[in-house]
Every structure is written in C-alpha cells, then in structure tokens.
Amino acid sequence: MHRFKTTWFRDPTEPDLFINENAVRIRAGLLLFIPLFMVLTLFYVFYTSPWIVDPATVKQTFDLSADYHIIYSGHMERRIIEYTPQTWVLIYAVFDLLAGMTVWTSRFSPTIQLSAFLARNRPSEWKPLGPKRFAWGLGLFLATFCLVFFNPSVFAQGINTVFAHDILPTTVNYIPYQIPVALVWVCLAMIWMEAVMGFCLGCKLHSLLVRLRVLKEPCHACNNLDWDAIARKRAG
C-alpha cells in the first residue's frame, strides 16, 4: 500500500516533488511500444498499396493505355482502414501522460506502478518533476494530435457543434498525412532517447526556457543535497 501511494516519488508531501529517474526511464521503455505501433500503422496506410488484387482473376486485355502500358483486368478491392485499436492505444497514452502530472493521479497509472516496482532494487536517482512535466506535455500534444488525425470526423463534429457552424469538414481528413508521419518519428526519438540514453529532450528545452526567463524554476539541486553524507565527510 505504501508503494502504491508513493509510486516513484521521493516524498509525495514535499513542496517541490522529486521522482526516481530510473523508474522514469523504465516507463519510457514501456511506452516506447506506442509510437512504434503508430509508425507501423502510418507506414502500412501511406506506403503500401490500398488495393487488394485477386491474382486468379487478372487477365490481359491486349489493349494499351495512352502511354503504351499493357492494360489488365481483374477483381480488385479497395482497403478500408479502421482505427479503433490505434484510437484506444492513443487514449491510454493521453491518460498515462496526464496521470504522471500529479501525485494522486500517478497511483492509477499501470505503467508508473510497474516501472516503480521494477526499479525498487536499484539505487534511486532523484530528479525534479517540473522538467519531466514539461516533457510529458510535449508528448501529450503529439499523442492528442495523432488522436485527432485518426478520428478527424469525430473531432470536426465536436468543433462544429461547439461553435454552431461548419468550421471543419466531416467527410475528409483535413490534416495532411506528412504532419503526423513527421511527429510520430519525433515522438519515437524522444522516448527512445529517454529510455535508452537517459537523455530527456523535453527537459533540455525546459532548461533553455528557464535560462531565457520564459519559465521560472527553483534551484532543485539545492534541495537535493545529501546532508547525511556531508555530515559524515565533515566528521571524518
């Protein structure tokens, strides 16, 4: 019960929260499967043929097209993509990223609980939560954008209902496919660097914004001193 309540936090009652970096990297490794799934989905949709041809029905017509290509006839079906599995995976990604933002909600994230459990026997490496929140915010934007891309009509209907006007079309995907293809690779790279290299790109961007005084951040390094080790060094 204690581990369920604290998850990966050093002390959930601290004014400035710190989380276990080892658990964060394990969680990133678990979430890595989500952008991989999206990459495979987008590759299948945009870079493979949408037509299913029955080879047994293909016959030569002995005619030529205007550019002198041989014309064949046969039974063909156009592939229809149904994005329900991708939608539910992205909904979970949005939920999990939001859950990590606070102490109370993090308890209900299966990946956070699992990563904290797997990191229990390793020496903890405490890092401030603020930069991680910023990085997860970027991931949240990417996941939400992909969710809209896979469900354009639902999103368009919602927007049109709110504004009582046909702002977005509901019969076509108004988002160019190049955008989600690029963003999903960015998301995959960010999670891979966090899980494998321990490099948090979102945290570096957060640090840059703090230096530019766009964001305010306390000196967390001052709050993470090992006073017991300092006392032992002075006594020695």
Image (cartoon, helix red, strand yellow):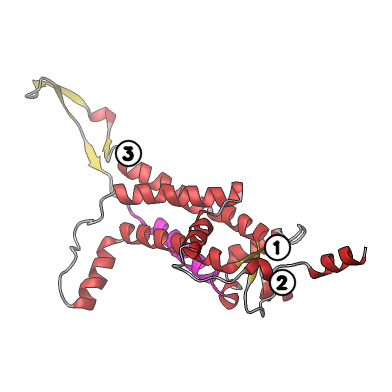
Q: Is residue 185 above or below residue 138?
A: above
The quadrant where residue 129 appears: bottom right
Residue at 69% across, 75% down? 11
> Which numbered disc, 2 or 3, marks the residue that appears first in the sequence?
2
> Which numbered disc, 1 or 3, marks the residue that appears first in the sequence?
3
Real-space Cα distance between discs 2 and 3? 45 Å
Residue at 52% across, 67% down? 133
Horizontally, residue 128 falls left or right of residue 65, namely right
Principal secondary structure, stretch drawn in magenta: helix
Image mark for residue 117:
1
Q: Position of residue 176 (x, y in %)?
A: 25, 51
Classify 10 Å Cα crowding around label 3: few (below 14), some (14-19), many (20 and above): few
Real-space Cα distance between discs 1 and 3? 40 Å
What's the residue type where badge 1 is placed? Phe
Q: Which residues are magenta?
A: 82-102
Q: Position of residue 40 (x, y in %)?
A: 42, 44
Image mark for residue 47:
3
Residue matched to label 2:
3
Q: Check if residue 85 falls in the magenta segment.
A: yes
Q: Check if residue 96 falls in the magenta segment.
A: yes
